[in-house]
Every structure is written in C-alpha cells, then in structure tokens.
Image (tube, coloured by chain):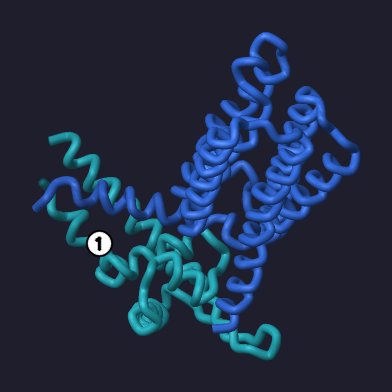
Amino acid sequence: MDSNWAGEHLQVIRTLMERSAIYRRTLAPIMLLLGILGLLAAAGGWFFGLESGRAFVLYWTAIGLVGLCGAYLMVRRQSLKEAEPFWSPPTRRVTQALLPPLFAGLIAGILAVFPAAREALQIWWLPPLWMVLYGCALHAAGFFMPRGMKLFGWGFIVSGGALAGCLSCAGGVYALLHAHIVMGASFGGFHLAYGLYLYFTENRKNEA
Amino acid sequence: MNPEPFLQLDRVIHEKGRMAIMALLAASPELSFTELRDTLSMTDGNLSVHLRTLQEAGYVALTKTFQNRKPLTTCALTPTGRNLFSNYINLLEQIVQQNKAK
C-alpha cells in the first residue's frame, strides 16, 4: 500500500475546506464595491484635477487602502452573519497571498513620490505596474478562492503588460489626468464587470 | 503497518467524490447544489448520486426551498455526518503517524 495516500487525502481535505470558506458569497459584493469605488475615485481624480505625481500616488494609495479595508469589513460582516470566525485559516492564507505584491505596489508608489526616484520611475509607469502587481496578488489569492479569481488576476496582468507596451511605444507622455481614467477603467471597470458577472451568475446558479 | 485504522475507515466517505463533498460541507454551514458542483467540477448527475448516497447514510441533509420562485437545493452536514467525518480525519492522521513512526 502506498504509504503517502493518507497524507495526500488529508491535504486534499484541507485544501477543499479552505477553499470552501466564507469568500464565495462575499465576493460579488466586494467586487461591486471595489468597482464603484474605482470609478468614483477616477472621476474624483479627474474632477479635482490631481495632476501632480505626488497627489496622484497619495490619492490612489489612499483609495487602495479604503478599498482593502472595505473588502475586509465585508468579509467580517459575512463571518459575523454566518457565526464563523473572521480571522480563519482561509482569511489568513488569502491575506498572506495578497500581501507581498500589494506591499511591492505600495513601495513603488512611495518611491515614486521622492524626487530622486521620480526620474527613474515615471509616475505614468505606476498604473501598469500596479495592475500587474495587483493581478499577481489576485492570482496568488486565487489558490484559496473560487477558480475565476486566477483568471481575473491574469486579466490584470495581461492588461497591465499591454498598457506598459503601449506606453513604451508612445513614450509615456500623456497628461497625468489620463492616468486617472486608466485607473478607473482598469481597477474600477474590471471589478465592476466581474462583480456584475458574479452577482448574476451566482443568482442563476442558486436557482438550480 | 498496523492495518487496523485503514479497516476502520468509513467506506461511505472513503471515496474521492464523497470525501470532497464532505470536506466542503464541513467548512461551511451549508452550500447550494450548484456551489458544490462548480467547486468540485462535477456533473449534475455525478453530484446527485454522491449526495443521495450521503443522504441515505444520514451524513448529509438536503433542503429544497424556493428563491425568487425558483427551486434552491442546499446541502449541509448532519451532526452524525460531522462526527463521522471528524473520525475519518482522525483515522487518516493515525495512519500518517504510523507511517512516520516506521
């Protein structure tokens, strides 16, 4: 008898139990929240004319933190509703998976506001860089979440890469106001589209 | 290897599909039929057969309700099913420990 089969069974059970936890039903509202937040933030950035590099970075970093806090509050709300622990192994694992790329994005943002680094890392490069890093974070978290999450992560990575390619060709000489539109279309639009998709498909699935 | 724990493994649970269903339900208060089907990439027929086996054994309770006038089937572990799944995991751990001790 293969001596490893029992351990493999346990590993399968563990993975399935972690995947099963509280995210499935919270995901659509979280995505909708992030989508609306992203679109509103883009409109705000455009409307208030945040054109300096420092303002752009601080503004979107703050929006990112608000979005992250909002997402965790919704998970918290769901866990309270279901009488489940908030800081469960799945929550911990998803957080651990998300943190490194998000932290790298934060560091890139902080570096970009310093004058010495601003020349090396032009502000216009931040949106595609953030998209790629965020895509990596989603892809990593996708190992503990429904399968579509990895694909969603790839969407950000590919779009960020394509945007970086376009910027390289164009020389990255657009006004920073346009970067707000890019942020809104990517972080706002993608989340909203995925949230709507989840919302309608989950409703339809539950009807079976 | 002492075969005793292996012989005690619950044959209803000790099947790939049913074990996966039990694992998912053990981590959630309840899941809909479609959530189970999509998470496990099973066909409707396959999942129905496994759920029926688990239901007949008294491990899983199925509830049929309506949501927006459309049928909704939810699945949850019974207290017996939860206990037996816990025993199943304990036995697997025993087997792993035995193998380590060898």
Q: Secondary structure at mark 1?
A: loop
* Residue B53 sits in quarter: bottom left
Q: Residue at x 33, y 80 (%)?
A: B46
Q: Residue at x 19, y 41 (%)?
A: B98
Horizontal placement of B39 versus A119: left or right?
A: left
* Residue B7 sits in quarter: bottom left
Extreme residue toward the front, this view: A170
Extreme residue toward the bottom, this view: B69
Chain identity of mark 1: B
Q: Is residue A21 visible?
A: yes
Tell me the blue chain. Answer: A
Residue A198, given in percent of the width and then of the height, sits at 61, 66
Horizontal placement of A149 versus A63: left or right?
A: left
Asked if A129 appears above or below B44 in the picture, the reply is above
Horizontal placement of A200 versus A176: left or right?
A: left
Q: Nearer the viewer, residue A165 or A146?
A: A165
Number of numbered discs overlaid on the protein picture: 1
Q: Residue at x 62, y 62 (%)?
A: A25
Name the residue beneath numbered marker 1. Answer: B9
The quadrant of the picture occupied by the C terminus of chain B is: top left
Tell me the cyan chain. Answer: B
Extreme residue toward the top, this view: A116
Asked if B31 appears above or below B63 in the picture, the reply is above
Q: Residue at x 65, y 23 (%)?
A: A122
Q: Nearer the viewer, residue A75 or A9?
A: A75
Residue B35, given in percent of the width and then of the height, sits at 51, 70
Asked if A58 appears above or below A82 in the picture, the reply is above
Asked if B91 appears above or below A52 in the picture, the reply is below
Q: Is residue A90 visible?
A: no
